[in-house]
Structure formats: C-alpha cells, structure tokens
Image (spheres, rainbow, N blue to C red):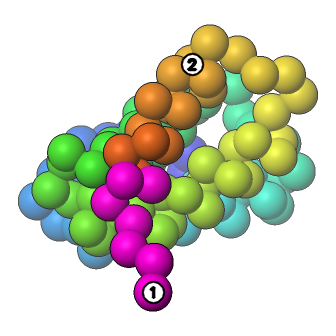
Amino acid sequence: LVSYLPLLWDEGVEHNMLRIAIISALLQIIKAIDELPESVTPFIYNVIEISTNVNDPSTVYLMDEGLELWLVVIQYTPQPNDALMKLCDNLIPIIGKTTFF
C-alpha cells in the first residue's frame, strides 16, 4: 500500500479529498507499524511541505491533516534531520495566517 500512495498523490493534484485520504492513510500506517518507514520518508516530507505551505491553494483543504502528519512524524523520528528541520520554514507563515479570537 505504501508504495502506491506516492502514485495516488501525484494523480490527485486536483482532488483534495483524495489527498486528505492519503494523508490519513499515512498517519494510520505510521501509527500501526510504530515507526516511520524510511523508504517513503522523502515522500512524507513532501506531503507535509505541500499540505502546510500557505502559498499552495490546496493548503485550505490539507492543513489540518498535514499538521497532524507532521506531529506524528516528529514523534516517530529518532533524531532531527535537515529535511525535517527544513519543514519548519512553513511555521511562521502558518502562524501569521492564523486568526485568534
């Protein structure tokens, strides 16, 4: 299943509900196997980057699941790495777009 998710992600560029389902599947897979599969880690980082990039129009749909995936990835990553730290570039724009009531 994990090997097909990147293909589905690429096919789902115009289908945000499909991409939400893919993110949810990734979340459940990581939690179920209790580790971050190294073979798809670059794909997962790409999914997080896209879903949390406020300049990407699909972020409106993908942000919640993308942030949840990011949290799970942080929990299951044994050591921080450059790719994971690079994702932090999305944090300030996310905070800047957040409205507090």
Which class describes the residues within 10 Å of circle 1: few (<14), some (14-19), or many (20+)?
A: few
**Residue 81 on image: x %, y %:** 70, 16
Disc 1 residue type? Phe
* Residue at image point 56% right, 45% down: 2
Q: Among all residues in the image, which is located at the extreme left?
A: 14
Residue denoted by label 1: 101
- Viewer-side residue, 43 vs 71: 71
Q: CA distance from mark 1 to mark 2?
A: 33 Å
Q: Among all residues in the image, which is located at the extreme top?
A: 82
Instruction: Check the picture and name the quadrant holding the C terminus.
Output: bottom left
The span shown in magenta is: 95-101
Residue 77 is inside the magenta segment: no
Q: Under tag 2, what secondary structure? A: helix
Residue denoted by label 2: 83
Which callout, 1 or 2, points at the residue further toward the start of the chain?
2
Q: Under tag 1, what secondary structure? A: loop
Total marks placed: 2
The answer to whether residue 1 is visible is yes
Mark 1 in CB contact with mark 2 (< 8 angstroms): no
- In the rendered structure, the answer to whether residue 11 lies left or right of residue 100 reads left
* Residue at image point 51% right, 31% down: 87
**Residue 53 on image: x %, y %:** 32, 44
- In the rendered structure, the answer to whether residue 84 lies left or right of residue 78 reads left
Q: Among all residues in the image, which is located at the extreme bottom?
A: 101
Q: Which mark is residue 90?
A: none
* Residue at image point 69% right, 53% down: 71
On the image, which quarter does residue 25 sit in? Answer: bottom right
Disc 2 residue type? Ala
**Residue 16 on image: x %, y %:** 23, 67
The answer to whether residue 51 is visible is no
* Residue at image point 19% right, 48% down: 56
On the image, which quarter does residue 55 sit in? Answer: top left
